[in-house]
Image (cartoon, coloured by chain):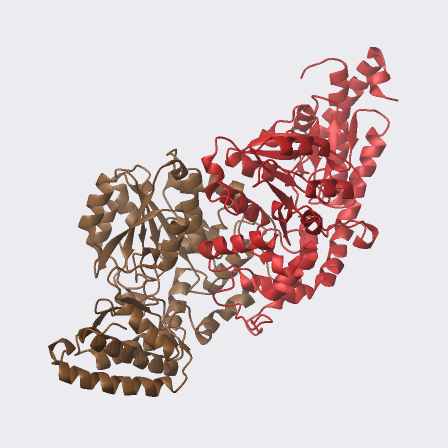
Chain colours: A red, B brown
Amino acid sequence: MLYTEMDTTALEDIKKELELEYEKVRGLNLKLNMSRGKPAPDQVAVSFPVLDELTSNSDIKSEDGTDCSNYGVVDGIPEAKKLMADMMGVSADNTIVCGNSSLNLMYDQVSRGFTHGYLGSEPWCKLDRVKFLCPVPGYDRHFLVTQHFGVEMINIPITSEGPDMDMVEELVANDPYIKGMWVVPRFSNPTGITYSDDTLKRLAALKPAAKDFRIFYDNAYCVHSLYGEENDTQLIDIFSEAAKYGNEDMIFEFSSTSKITFPGAGISAIAASDANIKEIKKTLTVQTIGHDKLNQLRHVRFFKDIGGIKIHMKKHADFIRPKFEKVLSILERELGTLGVGEWTNPRGGYFISFDSKQHCADKIYELCKDAGVTLTGAGATYPYGKDPENKNLRIAPTFPTIDELEKATELFALAVKLASVRAILGETA
Amino acid sequence: MLYTEMDTTALEDIKKELELEYEKVRGLNLKLNMSRGKPAPDQVAVSFPVLDELTSNSDIKSEDGTDCSNYGVVDGIPEAKKLMADMMGVSADNTIVCGNSSLNLMYDQVSRGFTHGYLGSEPWCKLDRVKFLCPVPGYDRHFLVTQHFGVEMINIPITSEGPDMDMVEELVANDPYIKGMWVVPRFSNPTGITYSDDTLKRLAALKPAAKDFRIFYDNAYCVHSLYGEENDTQLIDIFSEAAKYGNEDMIFEFSSTSKITFPGAGISAIAASDANIKEIKKTLTVQTIGHDKLNQLRHVRFFKDIGGIKIHMKKHADFIRPKFEKVLSILERELGTLGVGEWTNPRGGYFISFDSKQHCADKIYELCKDAGVTLTGAGATYPYGKDPENKNLRIAPTFPTIDELEKATELFALAVKLASVRAILGETA
């Protein structure tokens, strides 16, 4: 029965029961963490053989004869470009393979917007203001980058199809200060939703008032299906689609192997139009002599080709899928009939997004924290850490063990119930 | 006998001989390269065992228990901080260990000056102009970074003691637009000279008109002695020296293992004051989740400590020293008595700096190139690629074999002689 349809007496009884139960769990002194979007150690271990690919006896030449143990090659060795391009579904010529962090690539691209501008446009640092569209809930580290540069961030609500495209089209077409938009097109962080073809087509066809408007297309989870790539629809090719409208310069795509091999010790890549790639290469030549080619070589030797990546991703999915299913089954069992929350059922990625009743997220977070379960902070999924409805929470099921996850999710559900009852009863914490 | 003391007839005869000899060498169709400041493949191979330090069976935890195969730790694992700090002669608390490229760290620090400023100062992008002092001849990639950001670069002549400090003090004290200075304090690129204690003390005691003036102290060759560290004087501690004058925030120090392990696949570090380190960490937290800790761990496991680095550097020196000596002996033998050039006799680093007679450097470069020997371009050692006297050339002896080096240096000496005779005779090429 829905909490909202119960009378006060029934709710007061439920509250007392929940509070007793909560105190009991608190007594267990749990110390669990569902905040971190990182793979568990046993899952990362499936990638350890990558480390055996290069030893002191290995051939350290790339396929074009480049000595990967010495200086040079600012855009990545050819076989790494091919591998990362195939993974992103783009051309190797339009791909630059870089270091260990795609977040760093995004930071650099935003920074270049400020210091130099793109393709001859005025550097953003010369403007009074710069705005970015931020689909919400979204990835806190994206928002931190734009916040760091003083960008005004505009919330765009996200549905199961992607961001509200009516709003995006309207804003972008009329405001020349809107210079960018964050996008995670597949298994989005934290909702897990994948942008529909229609959404992607409308993104590709945008008519921005700002010539230097750019979509920061973070394809972090491009091969991160929980149920096998063959069972999931693939993204349409955003670059070909954009080219139909002369918009190919409008997109910077990013990806990495952080959640394929080693978080923080993989390889990353940026894909873009011919003109953008030419400009980025020119800047990169000033910025560095080249990225770590030995790590690029190590990765390609391990995977061989995109087929190797897909096989490897099934191993990861086998670790993660039961964890997602565990969390989702507990949420359904505990909260399915109460009307106090909604959550996503992702088919991939690293997160589940949970929306409580209004103004409850921070209370749920605190209840969990006081009982020893750390969640990602309430508000973190919104620019400036401010969730206007105070209802979104990001659940990260991958790092804990299944046992820990069970305990943590049960506490989470209890906290949701308790915070919701209190809210319905008009209590303020 | 000095060319300049010969009469025209004698010079014409010499010229004819040199031209015949030059045509003969041209006929050999050499294809040699003395332009690249990179170690030779057999030299790099001494570091290949670094690759064996981490395999799929290795413990991948750092000494404080951090899992180096997963996300986290923005400032580097503790043992890597200690190693790099000891190498630079600074405190580990004032050191951040980063990715594969110290050039990238310098680029980022300059970029931060433009986008955010340092310690509350106005971002440089808001100013009409920004100037940097550039000791010349210097490192082309330093100059390219500041050129990329539109910085006005001011040449500061360098002597065997370091840059002309009278000029530096005068300029820095009176021009608030001078925001930075490039410095390679030890075995400088390309002169190979090491700054004297007096020069370093005067640098540390500068009284800049600009509060946000910074010395970009690129200690790239801090352990790169050709004759053993025990036989070379060490740099005084620039940070303690600067602290005497309240100038500790004025210095950003950089280094890397690019010329210790793998060029482009080593680890890098930045050292700075408490206040600067705090600010850099804050920015880094926005920029990346962390650098490649597996590569940091691999490096520390290999070297153990600074003692391990010093032993390793002797192996490198054994490859490089004979190459330097070969070049220097040919220059001495061929040009020692002619008065047509001066060159440095470095005790470390990667380069020899050669000054021809005025207006001859580009001609020497062309003569070498036409006969199959590539040098670093004339002018490259000056900001904007413009050597006002057109006399400096950078010789990079490390990459070719001794045999190749012998041929290349003999051609170089021949080219110097020919260009000089032609210049004395008043010919323009």
Q: Quadrant of residue A429?
A: top right
Q: Where is residue B45 in the image (x, y as percent from the top left)?
A: 48, 73
Q: Tell how many labels.
A: 0
Left or right: residue B161 versus residue A187 is left
Q: Where is residue B406 in the image (x, y as percent from the top left)?
A: 33, 82
Q: Which residue lies furthest to the right in this view?
A: A1
In this view of the protein, can residue B184 be seen by the observer?
A: yes
Instruction: Reply above or below: A297 against B110.
Output: below
Instruction: Reply above or below: A181 against B269.
Output: above
Q: Which residue is drawn at 20% across and 49% down?
A: B167
Q: Quadrant of residue A421?
A: top right
Left or right: residue B380 versus residue A326 is left
Q: Position of residue B264 (x, y in %)?
A: 48, 62
Q: Which quadrant of the rendered structure holds the N terminus of chain A?
A: top right
Viewer-closest of A242 and B253:
A242
Instruction: Reply above or below: B233 against A360.
Output: below
Q: Residue at x 28, y 87 (%)?
A: B20
Viewer-closest of A44 and B23:
B23
Viewer-closest of A139 and B355:
B355
Viewer-closest of A40 and A85:
A85
Q: Where is residue A4 in the image (x, y as percent from the top left)?
A: 83, 18
In this view of the protein, can residue B227 be seen by the observer?
A: no
